[in-house]
Amino acid sequence: MIQKLHEQVKHKIEKSNLTYQNQANKHRKEVVFRPGDLVLIHLKKDRFPTNRKGRLIPWSKGPFEVLERIHDNAYKIDLPRDNNVLATFNVSDLSLYINDEYMLI
């Protein structure tokens, strides 16, 4: 009887974990950058304290080139030396650069 109760509890825990996982992953999307892609870097106060001093300063900087893919969510970016920041970024801090120059005919 106790073993049956343990199995029921284990099944309920697995079911609730799956529900939590589905809810957490609902708004996530998989983003993959290739070496050579141009990306924008989101400037966060903890990583770029000198660049984020006010509300009217842009929230992103770039475009920068992706050098290599380290893992599913980590990329090495070609940054200038004057930033004094490590060149490895999480995918949540990057967004694809879209060149929006329009040709007038």
Image (cartoon, rainbow, N blue to C red):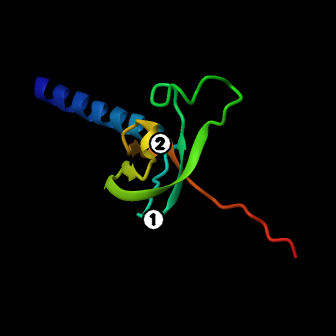
The reply to whether callout 1 and callout 2 are in contact (CB within 8 Å) is: no
Residue at position x 41%, y 34% in the image: 20
| Res. 59 image quadrant | top right
Relative depth, front residue between 96 and 80: 80
* Label located before the other in sequence (1 or 2): 1
Mark count: 2
Residue 98 - label: none
Q: Which residue lies furthest to the right in this view?
A: 105
Q: Where is 96 relative to 17, above or below?
A: below
Residue 31 lies, in percent from the top left, at 47, 54
Type of the residue with mark 2: Ser
Quadrant of the drawing holding the C terminus: bottom right
Q: What element carries label 1?
A: loop
Which is closer to the viewer, label 1 or label 2?
1
Q: Name the residue under label 2.
A: 92
> Is 18 displayed left or right of 104 in the figure?
left
Q: Mark 1 points at which residue?
A: 36
